[in-house]
Image (tube, rainbow, N blue to C red):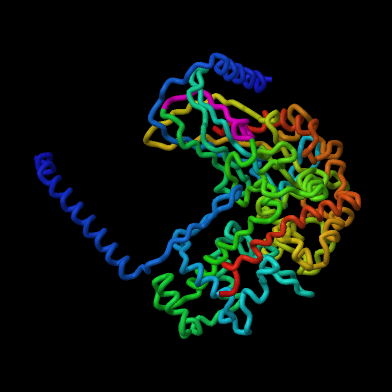
Amino acid sequence: MKKYLKFLALIFVFSTACEKEEEAPVVSPSSSLDLAFEHIIDSDSLQFDNTFYTNAAGNEYRVTFLKYIISGVELYTDGKRMFRQNTDPTVISARYVDSRMAPIPNAPLGTYDSIAFSMGVVPEYNYDNAFELSYNDLGMYWPTSLGGGYHFMRFEGHWRDGAVTGGYAFHIGQNENLITIGFPVNLTITKENKSQLTFLMNLNEWFDNPHFYDLTVESGYTMGDTIKMNMLVENGHNVFSLKN
Amino acid sequence: MKNTETKIKRPLVVVAVLTLCVLLVSAVSCNKSTEEPSLTPYSLVIPDGFPKMKIPTDNEPYVERIALGRKLYYDAILSNNGMSCSSCHLQNLGFTINSSSGMPVLPHINMGWKDKFMWDGREQGTLEDVMLFEVEQFFGTDIAKLNAHSQYPTLFSQAYGIDNIKSKDVAKALAQFFRVLISSDSKFDKVQRNEAQFTNDELQGFMIFNSEKGSCTHCHVPPFFADNGLHNIGLDSDFSDPANQGYFHESGDSAHLGQMRTPTLRNVSLRARYMHDGRFSSLEDVINQYNTGVQRTPYLDPIMIKSNNTVNLNLTPLEVSQLAAFLRTLTDSTFIKNPNFSKP
């Protein structure tokens, strides 16, 4: 409950700030901020391929693929939006240590008390070829015939439950499924030091909160399935936490 | 006192540093003029919609280097059995060959963007890295033959400013030629550029390709019609034959059993055999494998399992033919006839 209240309070702060449409004061010069991402299953660090984890429904699952895109980073002070990212979104590839960082090169110097970002691609970048993907990330394009743009997330693997086995491919995309989340922070960006915030993605939350996702009941394949995708989007608001 | 000394010495230090810099720059320039060859810059044109190509800074493209790589590509001097790269990579077939047996040869198309090579993805790195593998391990090139050749020492000296050819130099020259083998002028590309139109069947096939009905585009992603990835697409349920084990060979991880690299579909209709072991001989056979023959194993790529928990596409015969019609639009006639890529 506390978690929800905190979340609602943050959303209120962010939405109020947007409604006011106050121009952010000029803050200069710019420095840099890195958002780092780590992937966990409750208290365990994610191991790809052969390690099975247990979700809330008791399904055992393993992860073979996890990529998602981070965009629309915003910094706030006292409810005022001081900065919004205007650089290309970043693909986070959980498998590779050097692909788990979203650099925000032009974050202005200053002190901020909250941050928001989107898991997915904010609408101003979510159309075909709005930003370039490397060959290894081409699979993050969203099919043109399904609206184009980019996959917000591809989370794939296999599951088993007793003698029953299957695969899951949690794919999220399209503007209405953007997951925007905010966190209170104590962040000071200085000229001298690069700042970094580390966020944890708890994969078990994709299966649990608020929607219980039992792979023996629900299909694990979400492309073209609005209902399943909506369940994931709502769960997606609870998968990230700020690492202390 | 200390401060005074510093004040007096500072201009001297600045002059000394500047002098050193000038001397250093002159020395580097002088060195460059004697050691670096004079080369003709080559502007690599990246087609619209293609990502940037990463090129190592020590192997920037130049006309002379590309010409050298092209000469080597067609020269049996690389091997000890009369074979050259072009023996198995024929331009008129999209730089592959239609052999009747053995593992089908992957085409040399748009290789400049890749960092995983071979069917099972065991070679990874830059083009220079995989070319070094080809020179040293695949061909076992006798470098002494190149150094004793009537032309190559001069050509390498002109292109790379070296007197003694080494394997890595041959690899670098070959990589230069591979980077220019860009295919982007098929009917599909022309349709994208509004220079041509699909027939109705091709258009229907394109829709199937891109939709969940065919779900082809998850791995065969335009513009390369590949994803540089490794997948088990359900060809087999028994992996006792090492030829079918895929990336497991490299990783030793059972999760990778049957994972093969996604081949590009560009010029796919020019090929006579499909899959890593050439088990199919027509595009329709390949589509029918996805349609009815996918083997469900614990290693099957999750992307192959559909929302209704089935693994087969269940396309109608008409849809199969339409999908094949679309795949035939990926033939790039300009590429396979480009005189700049032929034997010099």
Image quadrant containing the C terminus of chain A: top right
Q: Quadrant of residue A124?
A: top right
- Residue plotted at (57% across, 46% down): A99
- Residue plotted at (67% across, 51% down): B190
- Give percent across and percent down for residue B78: 57, 79
Q: Is residue B35 above or below residue A6?
A: below
- Give percent across and percent down for residue B12: 13, 49
Is B166 left, or right, of B105 in this rendering? left
Compare residues B109 and B63 and report the one nearer the observer: B63
- Give percent across and percent down for residue B82: 62, 84
Q: Is residue A95 above or below residue A12?
A: below
Image quadrant containing the N terminus of chain A: top right
Compare residues A145 and A125 and report the one nearer the observer: A145
Q: Is residue A80 above or below residue A66?
A: above
Q: Quadrant of residue B329?
A: bottom right
Question: Which residues lie in the magenta part?
Answer: A110-126
Q: Is residue B302 visible?
A: no
- Residue plotted at (32% across, 65% down): B32
Q: Is residue A155 visible?
A: yes
Compare residues B246 and B54 and report the one nearer the observer: B54
Q: Is residue A226 above or below residue B127?
A: above
Query: Is residue A122 highlighted in magenta?
Result: yes
Is B14 left, or right, of A175 in this rendering? left
Is B27 left, or right, of B300 in this rendering? left
- Residue plotted at (79% across, 45% down): B207
- Give percent across and percent down for residue B57: 45, 59
